[in-house]
Amino acid sequence: MTGERPEPRQDRALLSRALKRLRTRSGRSKPEVAAAMNLSVRAYERFEAGDIRFNLDYVHRFARATDCDPNAILLAMAMGSPEFAVRSADNRFATILMIALRRFDETVGDGLSRMEVRTLVSAVTAMFDGLAARPSTPDPTRTWLEQGQAELEAKRPGPGR
């Protein structure tokens, strides 16, 4: 046994775990987040602990208060992975997915119901497989920026009198 606590399985426990990790990541205290959400500290504590019914408005207020992705919180609950909310807090991955899904739905419309499961699975898994392969390759824009900054630094005259 690794000594780690088992992952929570109840919705409220999943939400609570994600919220606590996101608040800690943001560096904000409970009173700070409560004030930013326009809640009393006690109401916020009950929300973070999962002691109240799920409230979508609170999730969105929390996301604004902690600068994270509200859709990542929702998907984290659906996936049973509070870590997903933290992993995608900064890059807004879940919101990107939701925007793309909404646009796809608008474009395809009723045609979605006629699409083969095989086609959908192939397309979605190909996208995720491609993304999974990318972290191991360097980002050419970051390399370009770092090289450019080094060149600027090298050409910059030193301070003089």
Image (spheres, grey):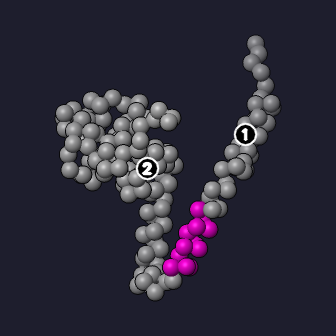
Mark 2 is on which residue type?
Ser
Q: Nearer the viewer, residue 65 or 150?
A: 65
Q: Nearer the viewer, residue 39 or 8?
A: 8
Q: Nearer the viewer, residue 148 or 74?
A: 74
User: Is label 2 in a helix, a strand or a loop?
Assistant: loop
Asked if residue 18 can be seen in this view, the reply is no
User: Is label 1 in a helix, a strand or a loop?
Assistant: helix
The answer to whether residue 67 is above or below residue 105 is above
The spot of residue 24 in percent (x, y) is: 40, 33
Question: Is the magenta region chiefly helix, strand or loop?
Answer: helix
Inspect the magenta stretch and tell me whether residue 38 lies in it.
no
The spot of residue 149 in percent (x, y) is: 73, 37
Q: Is residue 64 left or right of residue 141?
A: left
Question: Residue drawn at (54%, 73%), measured in percent from left and top?
Answer: 121
Which numbered disc, 2 or 1, marks the residue that appears first in the sequence?
2
Span colored in magenta = 117-128
Residue position marked by numbered label 1 in the rendering: 146
Mark 1 is on which residue type?
Glu
As measured in the structure, the alpha-carbon distance from the residue carrying label 2 to the one carrying label 1 is: 35 Å
Marks 2, 1: nearer the viewer: 2
Inspect the magenta stretch and tell me whether residue 126 lies in it.
yes
Q: Nearer the viewer, residue 49 or 148?
A: 49
| The furthest residue to the top | 161
Contact (CB < 8 A) between labels 2 and 1? Answer: no
Question: Residue drawn at (59%, 74%), measured in percent from left and top?
Answer: 122
Q: Which mark is residue 81?
A: 2
